[in-house]
Amino acid sequence: MTTPAILPERGLADRLTALFWRHPRLLLAVLLTPPLLWLGVVYLGSLAALLLQSFYSIDEFSGMVKEEFTLKTYAELFRAQNLDIILRTLLMSAAVTLGCALIAFPIAYYAARFARGKWKAVFYLGVMLPLWSSYLVKVYAWKLILAKEGIITWAAEGVGLSMILNAILAIPGIGGNSLSTSPLGTFIVFVYVWLPYMILPMQASLERVPTSMLEASADLGASRAQTFRTVILPLAMPGVIAGSIFTFSLTMGDYIIPQIVGTSARFIGLAVYQLQGTAGNIPLAAAFAVVPIVIMLVYLTIAKRKGAFDAL
Amino acid sequence: MTAAVEFQRVSRHFGPASAPVKAVDGVDLTIAEGSFFAMLGPSGSGKTTCLRLISGFEKPTGGTIRIFGQDVSDIPPNRRNVNTVFQDYALFPHMNVRDNVGYGLMVKGVDRRTREARAEEMLSLVKLDGYGDRKPAQLSGGQRQRVALARALVNEPKVLLLDEPLGALDLKLREAMQDELKTLQARLGITFVFVTHDQGEALSMADSLAVFNEGRIAQIGTPAEVYSRPRTRFVADFVGSSNVLPPEVTRAFGGPAKWSSLRPEMLRLTAPDGVALSGTVTGLRYLGAGSRVTVALNGTEVAAQLPAGQPVPEQGATVGLAFDPAALHVMEGEG
Ligand SMILES: Nc1ncnc2c1ncn2[C@@H]1O[C@H](COP(=O)(O)OP(=O)(O)O)[C@@H](O)[C@H]1O
Ligand SMILES: [Mg+2]
């Protein structure tokens, strides 16, 4: 039997393949147009609209938005009460990020280096499982756990650690009447809720560090601590940064947790929510919303300067 | 002379004791100080595991390892003055070449200025002057290999372990690096333990070599000994793909009724008439520097290597075979 050197065309699929083969740019255009439209119009477009709003101001008498370019709204951010909100949010986000990083690292390290087969599946399940249940349910559950009559107070009494709990709650700025009404409580819930977003990128970056790299370090005379500092940590840095982008920006934007757990002192997210809702001050809400973006940009610039992405 | 490395009945088994993978199994070996020692064997024969036992990344499940006379059972890798050139080089991607090379000094607390000067010295030793500021990703495979070498040498190790260091290089570069490594070793006087699966590389570079097969040493000796007097069929076949002759064929070739080996280049083709051995040409392979002719002699295929320029017989032709009887090597390692 002989076969032809050129196979016949089999309908539309072959014709399209041929068309794209002759014009590779066409394929690229077809593939890229929808995501670029999405990114350009829906995402960047709404960001631009937000930015535009923040340069308007509100008329003090009528309460209407004046559509004239002004920096007045941004100046308002620097009023003591607003600056307070920004600073509180920034501190909380930094603390949550640090807390998440400290807790996530050993977990991610174990999963990347030692967990195999079944244990790896257990790891992924353990990390992802909390993400599958409703966020609100988790937060309310934590409110109960942290409440004055809650399980933590009860357990502390049971093992005779009430003194320590009360001592912690007595620390000004962190403590409060009970864990569920203290900044510490807000911190704990934030750390719990965002932890998976730190573990997963960290684990991915640690997984990419080949064992031979660690062996090379030991081979050249490094102790375990030295290997950790000079090889593992720098190589894990892109993952840490990726994770911290999540925890940092998620904390800065959240407006539910501080309402349910904590002192009801306002955070940026809550301020935005209230300004655009009840107060109807869209320009100030927009200006507030720009703050996390600026903070993230500054953070990433510093991280880049410090060489956090050198291992990429 | 002290032995740089000494293995006494060293084993490394993996997996359950009921069905262990015997990566290294009862190996005895002595590596002389200042020598270039090669570990040769097919993939999976236990060479890397042996090297890792010396560097300390594997612990023996049996036997003792001595480095310069000292039992190293309880010494972790970072305290063994032994350095490794890893198979995948394992350069630190986030450090430039200079910091990579200076790493061993940095962890010892040598100040920056001294270690950078030493790193530059090492880089010029491996002919990479001026590459200090580059990142590993900006280097070619051959250059990375040199950086790995410089990095391992900066600590002035007593023993340098190289795990198939030339495996990823193309032929030309590989040959150049073989010469360089050999020269470097002679100049520094450091004991080199060199793992390879390339018999040509092992034969041309080593002062002595061990042939590995399934976790055991099949033969240990100088390249000339191993090449011309293989102990077992495995060695004869693996090192230089010799003709391995079963007892009855050995007898037909004029030897005792034992397994023997006969190097293809020791065989000559003659006219078929009036000789004891004749057969049909069943295969022809052009090798550039000569040709290899396969001749079938009553069921046994024998390869003869002809130097370039000699007339090559045709496929299917009947030819006679002649050889120097002294070239027929009887293998005492086979029963
Ligand atoms: N960590 C390990 N766990 C299980 N088996 C291993 C391990 N390391 C090596 N082996 C096995 O030991 C044998 C020898 O491996 P190796 O020393 O890497 O051989 P070579 O370097 O000669 O190719 C192989 O069968 C390999 O699968
Ligand atoms: Mg190997």
Image (cartoon, grey):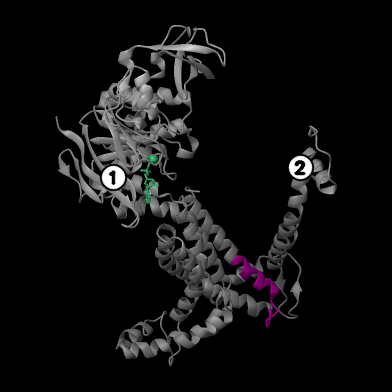
Q: Residue at x 50, y 51 (%)?
A: A304
**Label placed on residue B25:** 1
Mark 2 crowdedness (10 Å alpha carbons): few <14, some 14-19, many ≥20: few
Q: Amino acid at mark 1?
A: Asp
Q: Secondary structure at mark 1?
A: strand
Q: Give coordinates of residue A266: x percent, y percent.
A: 55, 79
Identify the image quadrant of the N terminus of chain B.
Answer: top left
Q: Give coordinates of residue A86: x percent, y percent.
A: 54, 71
Name which quarter of the figure residue A294 lies in: bottom right
Q: Give coordinates of residue B145: x percent, y percent.
A: 41, 33
Identify the subunit bearing mark 2.
A
Q: Is residue B291 above or below residue B301?
A: above
**Label placed on residue A25:** 2
**Label placed on residue A192:** none
Residue A279 falls inside the magenta stretch: yes
Residue B67: in sight, yes or no?
yes
Q: Residue at x 43, y 34 (%)?
A: B144
Front one among B189 and A77: B189
Q: Amino acid at mark 2?
A: Arg
Name which quarter of the figure residue B101 lies in: top left
Q: Are marks 1 and 2 in contact (CB under 8 Å)?
A: no
Span highlighted in magenta in the image:
A277-291
Q: Secondary structure at mark 2?
A: helix
Identify the subunit bearing mark 1.
B
Magenta part mainly helix, strand or loop? helix
Ligand 1 within 8 Å of the CB at mark 1 = no
